Amino acid sequence: MTSWHWVLVSCFSLFLPVSLSAELIHQPVELLQNQYGRKARIEKLNVLLTDDDAALVSGAGVSPFKERIFTFFVAKDQNKKILGYAGLLARKIRTKDQAALYFLSEKGELLSIELVAFYEPPEYQPTVKWLDQFKGAKVGQPIRVRHEVRVVTGATMTATSFVESANLVQAVWSQKIKGHM
Amino acid sequence: MRFLLSRDLRDNVTIRWLLVGYLIGVFAYLTASPVYESSQLGLFPSDLVHRVLGSRDLFLSPKSLTDVVVNLHVKMFLNSLIALILSSLLVRLSTAGTSKLAVACLFGLPVLESLSLVLLSQGLEFMSYVKAFAFVGLWTLQCGVSVVLLRYLLRTPR
């Protein structure tokens, strides 16, 4: 092979690693099992917001939202006692999609946020340490950027998106799931 | 005053090295092109279908026609620029049937790639195969023609 052939072959090899790039960070089921254990029973709840429900959720200090269908999971132990909840929310940050699982306690307190998918460039991806700031956020007390949560320099839209999503998940939980299980 | 007319581009040192520089630039673009393409739409038919038509399992929303056109118009401009320069050099080098076919493909494949992407965004899933084939075909052709031209330009004229 001449050197020119090697140039072409090495250029063509660029196709190999890029084809194997990961699409998803975690599967939601995998995250739920990690959080509540493999023996926990996970039930999926599809929540539909009517216009009246949406108005009530909006009144809870949540930023304007377009979503009307939400996916929640409820984890129960062997005795059907509720261990906790998780809300799955997929949204666009800038131009690309992201999805995250918002874990809530049985009282609706935010336990943690886990990334499911993140298609924006990796420099906009929030770190685990940054996401830990959301821990302990209570229902009815919306989180605010630059107050309870620091802004990430150069990734303000990411920060805003996660704060809005966390508030929305808690508000929807409070409106549609709390007391109904 | 006497003029010496020559069709050999290598006789003019300035033009020769300008073209070598340009072709190196084309190589740099072609090296990054698959990486960029895979991050935007994907290289393989299954990736293209997920990214363009959306996927609930991967949490991807479908791309609108506007998004597709915005992505396309930049690529069309770059590909036509490359096709114009490479084909004008190629026809000076050789007018054999192979060169004519290469020139036709340099202009035809970007059109085929764009058209298949637009049709894919309208729901024709099998167009993902045409799009993937057109991208790889065009990329290989641009690399190959650039190599041939670079070899020609770097060789000392007789």
Image (cartoon, coloured by chain):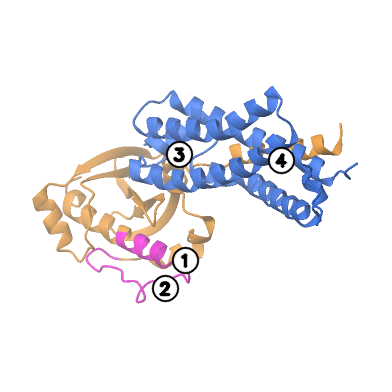
Q: Residues within 10 Å of mark 3 (few under 14, many from 20)?
A: few
Q: Main secondary structure of the magenta part?
A: loop
Residue B29 x %, y %: 63, 49
- Quadrant occupied by the C terminus of chain A: top left
The answer for how far apart the CA atoms under marks 4 and 3 are is 57 Å
Q: How far across and down, in percent of the image, does residue A10 sit?
A: 75, 39
Label 3 amino acid? Arg
Q: For mark 2, what is the residue?
A: A150
* Eye-nearest disc, 4 or 3: 4
Say if labels 2 and 1 share a chain. Answer: yes
Question: Which colour represents chain B?
Answer: blue
Q: Which residue is mark 1?
A: A130
Residue B52 found in image quarter: top left
Amino acid bearing label 4: Ser
Whichever of labels 3 and 2 marks the residue nearer the N terminus, that label is 3
Type of amino acid at the residue the image marks with label 1: Trp
Tell me the element at label 4: helix
Residue A77 lies within the magenta run: no
Dot 1 falls on a residue whose secondary structure is helix
Front position in the image: A19 or A107: A19
Callout 1 and callout 4 share a chain: no
